[in-house]
Image (cartoon, helix red, strand yellow):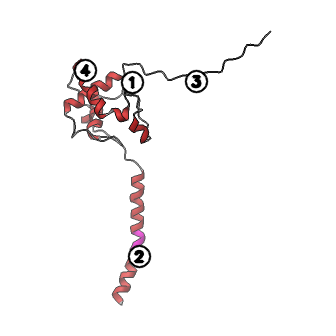
Amino acid sequence: MRKSTIALLALICFAPIGSAQDQAKDNQKAAPAEYKIPPEDAKRPNPVKPGPSSIADGKHLYESQCLMCHGKDGDGEGDLAEDMKLNLRDFRDPATFKETKDGEMFYVITKGKGEMPAEGDRLSDTQCWNLINYIRSLASKTPAAKPKEEKPKEEKAQS
């Protein structure tokens, strides 16, 4: 009887600690961790020249690996992104990667970020660099103009 009383008291005393720890874990899951790219990875230079062959290879990879989220033209409006309600950047906008180094892009592609899966086990380094060259080439293209809202035509007053 004494052992069961001690066990019951221990359960009562430590149960709130366990639930507080569980709540702390839930709070940690709710707050996303800050995404930091190691400086040595960010500085990594792209060894592949962005020539026609590299860009063509990168385009092929993009179409098979990235298009479903990032969109056919890099507009960030792929079918999967819409289904998952993701708000992705427009790769066609020159400002999107203006401050981003190739090494940073390489890191994100190979390691993943947020909902984006890591491609490091599926693509070779050269394939990743070709993909970066292609993605950068999209910024030189003019973003598709969004349709303007039509203003109602004003009726001319008859004199």
Residues at discs 1 and 2 in contact (Cβ within 8 Å): no
> Which of the numbered marks, if any, corresponds to residue 152?
none
Which numbered disc flags the more N-terminal residue, 1 or 4? 4
- For marks 2 and 4, give the CA distance: 65 Å
Q: Amino acid at mark 2?
A: Cys
Q: Amino acid at mark 3?
A: Glu
Residue, disc 2: 13
Q: Position of residue 87 (x, y in %)?
A: 44, 37
Residue, disc 4: 50
Which numbered disc flags the more N-terminal residue, 1 or 2? 2
Q: Is residue 87 magenta?
A: no
- For marks 4 and 3, give the CA distance: 38 Å
Q: Is residue 16 magenta?
A: yes
Residues at discs 1 and 4 in contact (Cβ within 8 Å): no
Query: What are the residue bounds of the magenta stretch?
Result: 12-17
Residue at horizontal 27%, vertical 39%? 38
Quarter residue 124 falls in: top left
Residue, disc 1: 92
